[in-house]
Amino acid sequence: MTNGCGAPTQGGTIEVASTETVLEGKVLSEGTPVGGAFVRLLDSTGEFTAEVVSSPEGDFRFFAAPGTWTVRALHRTGNGQAAVSAEGPGVHAVEIAVA
Amino acid sequence: MSRENVLVSAAWSEENLQTPGVVFAEVDEDTTAYDGGHIPGAVKIDWRNDLQDPVRRDFVDREGFEKLLSAKGISNDDTVVLYGGNNNWFAAYAYWYFKLYGHQNVKLLDGGRKKWELDGRPLDKEEVVRPATDYKAQEQDLSIRAFRDEVVEAIGNKNLVDVRSPDEFSGKLLAPAHLPQEQAQRGGHIPSAVNIPWSKAANEDGTFKSDEELRALYEEAGFDGSRKTIAYCRIGERSSHSWFALRELLGYEDVKNYDGSWTEYGSLIGVPIELGSGKEA
C-alpha cells in the first residue's frame, strides 16, 4: 500500500543511509525535554519545509539536504528556534529551547 | 460557498461537543495520537486502514464507505466535523473524500489538533461508541477528482497547482523532509505547474489564512481564476488541503484533486517532467 505523508513517530535510533542528511535533536525547556511540541523545519529563506511532533523525550528528526536550515518549535508553554547548518550528508544535531 | 459553511473554529467546536447531530471525527495516517487523547466524543478514522483499499491503490468503494460510516455511527443527516494532526492534511483529505461520496454537511476544524493543543483545550482517552447507523453513500462525484490522463492533457491548459515544498517541486527532494528520501519515482514536477506550497495557505498554528490573504497568494503565484484547476502533491493529502482553500474557501468552481499525485505521475513512462524551479509566473 502506498504510504501517506504523515510524520512518523519521533525518537529512537534509525539506520541512516550514507546519502541522507539528517537533522535531529531535542526540544528543551530549561533543560527539560518537551514532548508534544510542533517542530517546524524552515529552509534558508524561512519557507516552511516540514513539521513533526516531538516524542515524549523531546526528540525530533528531519530528512533534509545539505544547506542552512532553521528548526522552530511551538508548544502551549512557549516557542523557540535554532539554526543548523548541514555541510553534507550525515547526522547533524541541534537543540531547541522553548520559553 | 463561504467560510462559515465549511470551517469551524476550535472555540465553536469546544462549545458544540455535546450538540446532537454534530459528530467529531479525528482522521490521521498514524492514529496513535488519537489513542493517546482525542477531542471528547470524537470517533477515529484511520486514513490507511479505513479509507484505502487494502490491495489496489484506490479508495474503499461506495459500499465500503457506507459500511465504515454506519459502523462509526454517522448518519446521512449528521454534520461531520473533521480534524487531525499533520496540519489537518488527512482531515482535509477525508473532507474531500466525504464530498466525493456525496456527504454535503461536512466541515473542517480550523487548525486541527495543533490549534486545539496549542490552545490547551481538553483531550480524553474515553472509548467512543456511537450506535450504528444505516448510512447511504452516493456514486463518486468525479467533478472533484482528477485521473492521470486528464492531468497529462491539462499541461499548458489548466492551472496545475503543485502544492509540495519548493525542494520537492524542483526535484531536489522526493518526499517531505520528515520522511526518508529513498523513493521509486523520478523527481521534478508536471510541466506548466505552478508551485504554491500548501503551507503558504496556513498560519503557523495550522489555521487557514484569511480569504484576502489566500486570494493574494494564489493570484501572485500565477494562478488564473478563469481556468479550470487540478491540484496535486505527492500522494493527495496536502493537495486536499489546498483544494479546500481554492474550492471551499475561495469558491473557485472547477477544482479537482489529483490523488494519484507525484507518486503516480513520477512513475509513469513517457510523460514529460520539468526540473528546477520551473516557470515562475
Image (tube, rainbow, N blue to C red):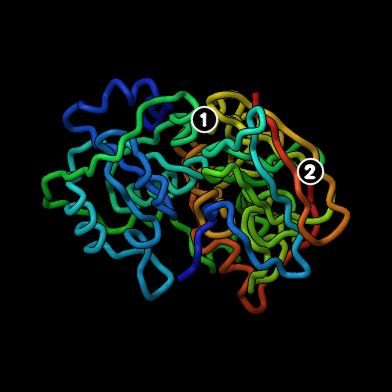
Please name the residue that numbered disc 2 is placed on: A69
The C terminus of chain B lies in which quarter of the figure?
top right
Give percent across and percent down for residue A38: 57, 37
Give percent across and percent down for residue B196: 66, 43
Circle 2 SS class: strand
Q: Residue at x 42, y 27 (%)?
A: B2
| Residue at far bottom of view | B269
* Disc 1 residue crowd, few under 14, some 14–19, many 20+, Cα 10 Å: many
The amino acid sitting under disc 1 is Thr
Relative to B135, residue B270 above or below: below
Chain to which mark 1 belongs: B
For the residue pair B37 and B52, the one nearer the viewer reads as B37
Q: Residue at x 53, y 33 (%)?
A: B206
Q: In the picture provided, is B191 more to the left or to the right than B160? A: right
* Disc 2 residue crowd, few under 14, some 14–19, many 20+, Cα 10 Å: many
| Residue at far front of view | A31
Please name the residue that numbered disc 1 is placed on: B207
Circle 1 SS class: loop
Give percent across and percent down for residue B243: 50, 44
